[in-house]
Image (cartoon, rainbow, N blue to C red):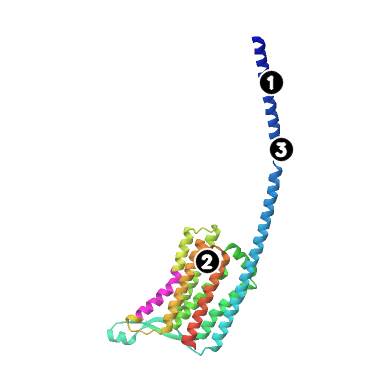
């Protein structure tokens, strides 16, 4: 009996092991079948993601075209306003001229005779007069031409520049137009020497070109401001800020030695300096990609508005203070 019981137990164990092997084989077959059927789902998922990507690319393309269209309208409207302002200033202002002179060292005969040795003094030669109304109209026309050209002839360039986040024409306008604005402020302040006026123009233009270089370096570095971009930005601030140091020194000299500045000059200095600081701050925010300034379209609108406000306000201040 004991042998039969042992034999039965062994047979039972063998049957249990066989059933386990059968279950294991069935599980392996099921897993293999599932693995074979699994690739069908990733293919569908890939197709769906591809469709979503294409749809998003189409949406982004439509959004970019819409933004470019809006920017073109901005350029057209502001160009037309600049042009209208230039005509108003040119034809409604009275004839007020500013002298242009060339200063150079020469021998002062009276001082040399009195001192007994040769004395050099600064001589001045009057070259001519310039109508201030036409000077103001010139920088307004310059801004108008650049805006209208960007909206018409150079629209493909505008699209490419907005896509890259770099607009050289914007900096060209700020450099030349801003330089003429600084020259206008200097002429109504009593600066008559041609070398000084030319230096103020070149300093402002150089500051704009250095800012353009910093913008190009940052864009080529995928929006990260490099050390050299920091260096160029600092040079741009130094070049653009030098004319304001000169104006400040003239104000200090007038205060120390009983000079005279009319009230509209103080308003010009205060407003235009504040707007110049706003432009420099906007450049900093753009290079750092801070907040909404990371968007090229927002940046373009911001610089357009700042240049329009600065040029229009200066034209109004000079017209009311001098040309009316």
- Residue 284 visible? The answer is yes
Q: Is residue 321 magenta?
A: no
Q: Position of residue 316 (x, y in %)?
A: 50, 83
Of the two numbered discs 1 and 2 in the rendering, the one whose residue sits closer to the viewer: 1
Q: Nearer the viewer, residue 113 or 245?
A: 245
Q: From this view, report whether residue 56 is shown above or below residue 71.
A: above
Q: Tell me the quadrant of the picture where the N terminus can be found.
A: top right
Q: Position of residue 232 (x, y in %)?
A: 47, 63
Residue denoted by label 3: 36
Span of residues in magenta: 238-253
Main secondary structure of the magenta stretch:
helix
Mark 2 lies on a secondary structure that is helix
Residue denoted by label 2: 212
Residue denoted by label 1: 15
- Residue 157 visible? The answer is no
Q: Earlier in the sequence, mark 1 or mark 3?
A: 1
Residue at mark 2 to residue at mark 3: CA–CA distance: 58 Å
């Amino acid at each position: 009996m004991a042998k039969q019981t042992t034999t039965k137990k062994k047979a039972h164990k063998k049957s249990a092991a066989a059933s386990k092997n059968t279950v294991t084989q069935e599980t392996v077959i099921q897993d293999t079948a599932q693995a074979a059927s699994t690739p069908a789902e990733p293919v569908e998922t890939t197709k769906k993601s591809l469709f979503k990507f294409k749809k998003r690319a189409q949406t982004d393309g439509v959004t970019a075209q819409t933004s470019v269209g809006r920017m073109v309208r901005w350029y057209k409207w502001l160009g037309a306003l600049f042009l209208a302002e230039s005509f108003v200033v040119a034809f409604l202002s009275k004839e007020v001229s500013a002298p242009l002179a060339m200063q150079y060292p020469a021998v002062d005969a009276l001082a040399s005779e009195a001192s007994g040795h040769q004395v050099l003094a600064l001589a001045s030669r009057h070259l001519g007069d310039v109508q201030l109304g036409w000077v103001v109209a010139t920088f307004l026309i310059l801004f108008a031409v650049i805006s209208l050209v960007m909206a018409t002839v150079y629209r493909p360039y505008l699209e490419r520049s907005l896509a890259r986040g770099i607009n050289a024409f914007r900096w060209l306008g700020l450099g030349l137009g801003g330089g003429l604005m600084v020259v206008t402020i200097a002429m109504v302040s009593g600066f008559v020497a041609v070398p000084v006026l030319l230096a103020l123009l070149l300093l402002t233009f150089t500051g704009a070109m250095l800012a353009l270089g910093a913008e190009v370096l940052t864009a080529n570095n995928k929006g990260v401001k490099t050390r050299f971009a920091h260096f160029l930005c600092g040079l741009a601030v130094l070049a653009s800020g030098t004319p304001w140091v000169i104006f400040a020194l003239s104000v200090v000299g007038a205060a120390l030695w009983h000079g005279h500045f009319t009230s509209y000059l103080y308003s010009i200095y205060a407003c235009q300096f504040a707007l110049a600081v706003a432009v420099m701050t906007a450049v900093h925010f753009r290079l750092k990609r801070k907040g909404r300034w990371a968007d090229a379209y927002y940046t373009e609108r911001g610089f357009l508005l700042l240049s329009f406000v600065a040029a229009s306000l200066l034209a109004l201040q000079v017209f009311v203070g001098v040309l009316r």
